Structure formats: C-alpha cells, structure tokens
Image (cartoon, helix red, strand yellow):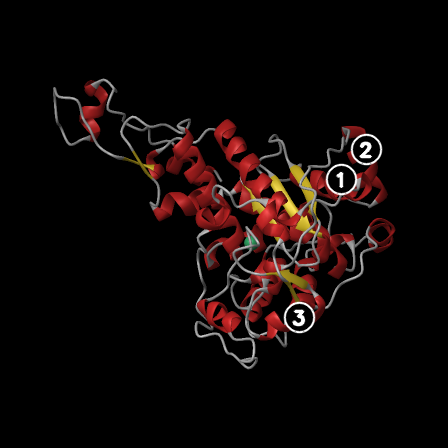
Amino acid sequence: MRRMAGVFTVLMVAASATPSHAAGRAGGQIGGIVKRAQQFHDLQITDEDEQKIGAAVSEKIRERYGVVQDPAIHKYVTLVGSALTQHSERPQIAWKFIVLDTDGVNALAAPGGYVHITRGALSLMHNEAELADVLGHEIIHVTEKHTLRAIQKGKAIQMGADETMASPGIFNKIVDKATEAVMAGFGRGEELEADEKGIVVASKTGYDPKGLGAFLSTLAERNKNSSSKNGLFASHPEMDERLKKLDGTIASQKLAGAAVVEARFHENVTYKPVPLASVTTVEKGAAGLAGESGKADDSSKKDDKKSDDKPADDGKKKKGFGLSKLMGGGGSSSTEQKAPETTGSQAARGVDTERNAKGGSNPAMVTVKVTPAEITAFKKDGKLS
Ligand SMILES: [Zn+2]
C-alpha cells in the first residue's frame, strides 16, 4: 500500500491556483494562469473522500441485492472481519461487513472498507477459514485501493479546471465508475495480489490459508456446466493458475495458520446453497446493478428458443456494463418490480447468473457493534492470533 501513495499525492492544479507553483508543473510557463483539464488520476483522494465514495458505492450494491436483516449473521461476519483487519495495513479505517440478501455467490469490496459478501457465498463455505480467506481477499482490494486505482488508470473522468471532488457531477461520476469497477471485478494482477496478500493476512490471524483454494474449488465445481465464469470470479484469472499460485504462496511464505473453526462456522451460518441452475435471476436493464457478461446475452434474450447459444465473446472479459446508464436517474425500484424473473436457463446461455441473481428488497445496513473485548474473546475461542 505504501508504494501506491504516490498515485494519490500529485496535487491538482486548478485554474484559480496561483501560477507560481503551477508553473513548474506546466513546463516552465511563467506568469499567466495555467489552465488545463484535470484528470482524475491527478486528484488527491483523502481517506475521508474514499470513505464517502465507498459509502455511495455500497449503497448502490445494497439497493441492488438487499441486505440480510439479521444482526446475528452480521455480528459473526464482522467478528471474523475485525480479527482480520487488525492484521491488515489499514486497521484504523471504519471497516463494515455486509451480508447481501441473494442466492448468487459473490463478494464485493468497495473503497473505504465496505466489504460485502452474499448469503449465497456463505452457503457454499465449509468453515470459518474459508470465510476468512475470502474476506481477506476483499480486504486487500480495499487496502491496496484497487478500485480507485482502476478508475484513475482508466482516465475516464475528465474534470473541468475549476471542478473538485466535491462538485456533485464529479462525485457521481466517480461513484458510478467505482461501482462499475467493483461489479466487473479487477484485472488479473489485482486479483492475484488480493489472493496472495489476503491469505497472508488470514494466516497471520491464525486461519488456515488453504481455505481460499478450497472455496475456489467448490466454486469451480458449481460452475463446471456453465459456459461463462460467474460472479465472484467472472474476471478472475484462470482457476488452475490461481490454485497453483496459492499453493506457491503458502509454501514460499511458510504460511502456518492452522485454525479452520468448523463448528463455530456452522453454528452461525446455516444457509443452504441454491444450485446455479435454480438461482432466480432478474433480466438485464431492469436489474439495476446486474452485471451483463456479454453481448451474446442481448441476442439470446430476444430469442429464447436458441437455448444452445454460445456466447460470442466467450473468453473475452467485459470490463464495464454501462452502470451509469443502468443505474442513473430513474433506475428505480418500480422498474425492478417489473423485472421478469427467470430461473436457471441463463447459466447455460453464458449469462452471469451469480451477478444477475435476484436480491432482497431491503437495502438498509444492519449496524452491529463489536467491542475490542468481544474480538479478543472471539479470537481466543477460535485459537486465533
Ligand atoms: Zn477479487
């Protein structure tokens, strides 16, 4: 994380800035006011700004999938998450762990410490180590600021010379781009980094780092008959490569975390997995945040008889899916209610069933309080560190 600080510390030069220090950056222009369009990647993003962006992104995610209105499950996931973040590079930020109300298997990290995991993902796990390793992966997306880095790299946000982060148009644009990045998943490099550093954090916390590989294998099994990669791993590197790299990390870094914590996990997580073919999805467009996985989807949808459709863009990973368009003004719940629901068949057509999965209707965050003493007791009980 430290090495990334430079990305965010280039100060922006506004039209109104005094020319004296702007001159140096503009190649020796002296005197006149330096006017230039700002790029988002020049913008300094404070922790506070990051928090605001993350809160807005989380709200969109919660509106799309709903939140499980159960304090007990939130408390449990928050305790696991809190034990982990103590060993992360940003223990001080206001981490939030949110359980999304959908059968789709997914986990999504928004800037500023908003970590979301779906009911469907929890239902597929066998023990607390698997949960911790997946949360560890998401925590790294936050600590390494992968979302902000992705949209800054994209240069998609051009700012007027006198606009700032606080300008409503700019803020909304940033939130749309950030949500899009979070939903689409990150690049191969970021995903492998999150895998590796995530299991290091989990192992430092005492958890068995092999949980991530175990969960990924379960997911691969779940998706073996699907013609597209789904949800959590839609844009992730090939599974074999990931599993191999995970084993390599465990060996080379001598990761010795041994806690699996199976009994406590099952006391707290009782969701039953819904097979991919039975996951109810909402149609594109009406689903708001639903991730479109490919163009083939558009055509196949118009003709349901083409059940043997192979996605034309098989293998190509769609980066964005026009979130701002889908979610922008008026993308309201009234549209959502009209959303036709389908079950199963989409998976065979290469549609990302996990991400298109229907969600619950209540986006309200479930606030749980976890005291330092409770975290200590939780760690002791699980033989964590
Ligand atoms: Zn990831």
Q: Position of residue 18 (x, y in %)?
A: 23, 17
As displayed, is residue 181 above or below residue 27? Answer: below
Q: CA distance from mark 3 to mark 1?
A: 34 Å
Asked whether residue 251 is in view, the answer is no
Q: Nearer the viewer, mark 3 or mark 2?
A: 3
Element class at badge 1: helix
Q: Does the closest atom of ligand 1 sit within 8 Å of the Cβ of label 3? A: no
Residue displayed at 81% across by 29% down = 373
378 sits left or right of 207 in the view: right
Which residue is denoted by mark 1 in the rendering?
A: 79
Whole-percent x, y for residue 209 in the image: 68, 56
Q: Quadrant of ligand 1?
A: bottom right
How many other residues sit within 10 Å of disc 1, few (<14), some (14-19) or many (≥20)?
many
* Spatial CA span between label 1 and label 2: 8 Å
Q: Secondary structure at mark 2?
A: helix
The location of residue 207, given as percent across then percent down, is: 73, 51
Residue to which mark 3 is pinned: 344
Expressed as whole percent of the image width and height from the top left, the position of residue 63 reads: 62, 44
Q: Nearer the viewer, residue 292 or 263?
A: 292
Labelled pair 1, 2 in contact (Cβ < 8 Å): yes
Q: Nearer the viewer, residue 285 or 180?
A: 285
The quadrant holding residue 79 is top right
